[in-house]
Image: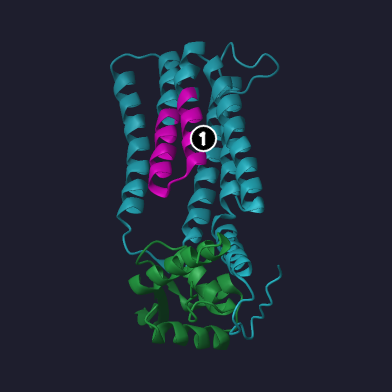
Amino acid sequence: MMVNQTPADGDEPLPSPDAALALIRDQQRSVERNQLGGIPWVLVMWGIAWGVGFLALWSGYDGGNPWFQLPLAVAGAIFGAIFLAASIVSVIVISRLGRGVRVASGFGGTVFGISSSASFVAVYLIGVALARAGADGALISLYLPAGFGMTTGLLFLMGAALWRSVSQVVLGAIIMVTAVVAPFFGAPTNNVVMAVLGGGSFLIAAVAMQLGLKRGR
Amino acid sequence: MIELDPVIHAAARLRISATLASLDDGDRITFPRLQELLDMTAGNLSTHLRKLEDAEYVSVTKAHQGRTPVTFVTLTRRGRRAFEDYTDALRALLGGEK
């Protein structure tokens, strides 16, 4: 049933309970689309970052990419630049999600934000400690992607708990499995696992979310 | 006989209530952002907000961000309860309950 709603008025009673429920559903979907519309693009950005970044690293190590090789410094620079770009895009998009809204309790979001940055720094510092204790380059190249991947997966699970999102549970679990499985392939093949399984999961999650927002799941 | 709350049972006020109810309890939204989410004129939104405010379903507060005055709107506890009762009533009507 069509709801005769004009922005200039809207004071008339609704014609039926059906129409009223449809109006509530349509309006809440529209709000959700408006607020979350940028998230699939953030996921695409991370899919590309993981895909291109880890393939670049794979191409930087001896015994990696059989088709072409990059100097390790160049591969590292590509990886760093693309991850930095993805982080900046994420911060911009996510900070705009809640624009115009003053939350009553920002505790959860603040803890999430601070612990995200702190845990990535922690993973890096543990890597430094391992290197100082004698871990060689191959070992560190197994540890760092696994550590960062594991942290990313955990953050998605934390986010899923905070914002009650089942799709985030799935993505977080896949990212964690990827991070745990990748080192078993040894270096530098672990980078291919991170690129394909991790990057691919982000891209699939982006498409799934975009379709969900369109359909108004 | 199930009666629908006449304050909410009008297209514009139902859309406003549905939008505010989609925020977490106690969260406040600025007037311009609410207007953007509803695609309503400022005058029309103000008129309907006043009716919701008279019923104590929404609370409108003014604050300052630097020198700029900002108007915040939030669903009161009473308003949230009224919206939930209203949707329950709609479902009951559709389910054929008396």
The magenta stretch is A149-177
Q: Nearer the viewer, residue A44 or A19?
A: A19
- Please identify which colour was used for chain B in the image: green
Q: Residue visible at 31% across and 48% down? A: A111
Q: Is residue A105 visible?
A: yes
Depth order, front residue of A50/A98: A98
> Does residue A124 show up magenta in the picture?
no
Residue that appears at 61% across and 82% down: A10
- Name the quadrant containing residue A66: top right
- Kindly report the secondary structure that dominates the magenta region of the rendered protein: helix
**Is residue A171 inside the magenta stretch?**
yes
- Which chain shows up in cyan? A
* Residue that appears at 46% across and 16% down: A183
What x and y, as percent, mark residue A134?
32, 13
Is residue A139 rendered to the left or right of residue A74? left
Q: Position of residue A22 (x, y in %)?
A: 62, 64
Q: How packed is label 1: few (under 14 Cα within 10 Å), some, or many (20 or more)? A: many
Q: Is residue A100 above or below residue A61?
A: below
Q: Disc 1 marks which amino acid?
A: Leu
Q: Secondary structure at mark 1?
A: helix
Chain of the residue under label 1: A
Q: Is residue A83 left or right of residue A155?
A: right
Query: How far across and how far down the image is residue A171, in percent?
Result: 51, 35
What is the count of numbered marks?
A: 1
What residue does disc 1 label? A171
